[in-house]
Image (tube, rainbow, N blue to C red):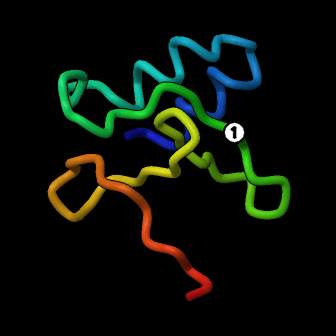
Amino acid sequence: MDQTLFTNLCRAGKFKEALGLAIQGHEDEKYTPSRFSIDKKTRLPIFYRGNKRVEPDEEGVWQLAKNPNP
């Protein structure tokens, strides 16, 4: 995913297109995100499938996110 293009789409208010860019090529996976939000501190996107946080693994396959605070 091109982070600069993703950010530019969000700033332009094209959120569906930005989400489409993030999931491009992985639309039929079990944990493909259905929504996202932007972290206020880091300005990076946080992706969700329903109420579960998801992130891509090394191969780009969407998986449930690991809890950073065990």
Badge 1: how crowded within 10 Å, few (<14), some, or many (20+)? Answer: few
Q: Residue at x 20, y 32 (%)?
A: 29
Q: Is residue 56 left or right of residue 7?
A: left
Q: Answer with the quarter of the image where residue 55 lies.
A: bottom left
Give how far across and how far down residue 6 sits, in percent: 55, 32
Q: Relative to residue 7, is residue 12 depicted above or below? A: above
Q: What residue is shown with label 1? A: 37
Considering the image in quadrants, where does the N terminus appear?
top left
As drawn, is 13 to the left or to the right of 21? Answer: right
**Vertical side of 26 occupied by 57: above or below:** below
Image quadrant containing the C terminus? bottom right
Query: Going 47% across and 36% down the picture, which residue do you hit?
Result: 49
Look at the numbered disc 1 and give the secondary structure of its residue.
strand
Kindly identify the residue that appears in the image at 30 percent across and 54 percent down.
Answer: 63
Q: Nearer the viewer, residue 1 or 15?
A: 15
Name the side, left or right, on which 52 lies relative to 61.
right
Q: Residue at x 52, y 33 (%)?
A: 50
The relative height of residue 21 versus residue 12 in the rendered view (above or below) is below
- Specify the quadrant of the image occupied by residue 69: bottom right
Q: Amino acid at mark 1?
A: Ser
- Residue farthest right in this picture: 40
Q: In front here: 49 or 2?
A: 49
